Image (spheres, grey):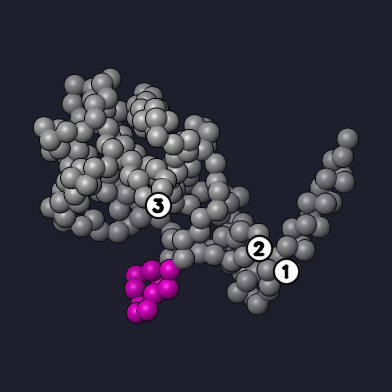
């Protein structure tokens, strides 16, 4: 495996990988991808503005990672490894290269992960990344396809919604929890009631299992 910093000569490889990244992501979400040319222009734009981009090769382009700098922080924007090259440590190597770069300038690197992408969440947590404090909110001012196909989740009892994906990997227990949570709130119950129920259940479990 070889990891190279993106330059002008390698730009077409990055553009093609970037297209594959979004083709896979939109497939999981059940959405139609944009035209390939729009992704090519977007990828080139990131390169021209100076984003730090590394490409991984195994005789051919196999993956990439893109790092941006905004609001005084470094952000991993995308990490992608083509399916046939996964489970070989390539993603970990790309992250390692980015972390080496960031250490020369700062002491932290940030990223966003979609709630539905359980594989990605597990990957990042294995590498020592942890959740902090970001919640994405949206208000649709006109009807959109987002008006259907949600799961109900919660944070400290506060009700939120996440999109249903075409290729989800929630366990049966996780699916059942979201179903019960949705029913709970549709019946007019409140955050305070939810927290009381959960706290009592946890207190009871701790008492029953206290050594």
User: Mark 3 against mark 1, which lies toward the viewer?
Assistant: 3
Q: Nearer the viewer, residue 94 or 98?
A: 98
Q: Main secondary structure of the magenta part?
A: loop
Residue on which the image places disc 1:
192
Mark closest to the chain's N terminus, 3 or 1: 3
Label for residue 210? none
* SS state under label 3: loop
Of the two numbered discs 1 and 2 on the same chain, state the one appearing first in sequence.
Answer: 2
Position of the C terminus by quadrant:
top right
| Numbered badge on residue 157 | 2
Residue 200 placement (x, y as % from top left): 81, 57
Query: Badge 1 local density, few (<14 within 10 Å), some, or many (20+)?
Result: few
Residue 57 position in % (x across, y down): 23, 25
Quadrant where the N terminus is found in the figure: top left
Numbered disc 2: secondary structure = loop
- Read off the magenta span: 138-148
Q: Which residue is mark 3?
A: 71
Camera-nearest label, 3 or 2:
3
């Amino acid at each position: 495996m070889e990891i190279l910093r993106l330059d002008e000569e390698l730009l077409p490889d990055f553009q093609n990988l970037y297209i594959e990244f979004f083709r896979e992501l939109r497939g999981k979400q059940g959405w139609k991808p944009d035209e390939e040319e729009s992704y090519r222009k977007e990828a080139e734009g990131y390169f021209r503005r100076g984003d730090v981009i590394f490409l991984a090769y195994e005789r051919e382009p196999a993956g990439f990672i893109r790092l941006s700098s905004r609001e005084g922080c470094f952000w991993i924007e995308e990490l992608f490894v083509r399916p046939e090259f996964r489970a070989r440590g390539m993603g970990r190597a790309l992250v390692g290269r980015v972390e080496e770069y960031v250490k020369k300038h700062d002491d932290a690197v940030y990223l966003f992960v979609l709630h539905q992408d359980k594989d990605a969440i597990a990957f990042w947590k294995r590498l020592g990344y942890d959740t902090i404090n970001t919640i994405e909110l949206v208000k649709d001012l006109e009807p959109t396809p987002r008006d259907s196909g949600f799961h109900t989740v919660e944070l400290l009892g506060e009700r939120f919604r996440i999109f249903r994906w075409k290729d989800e990997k929630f366990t049966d227990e996780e699916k059942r929890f979201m179903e019960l949570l949705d029913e709970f709130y549709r019946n007019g119950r409140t955050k305070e009631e939810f927290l009381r129920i959960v706290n009592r259940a946890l207190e009871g479990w701790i008492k029953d299992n206290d050594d």
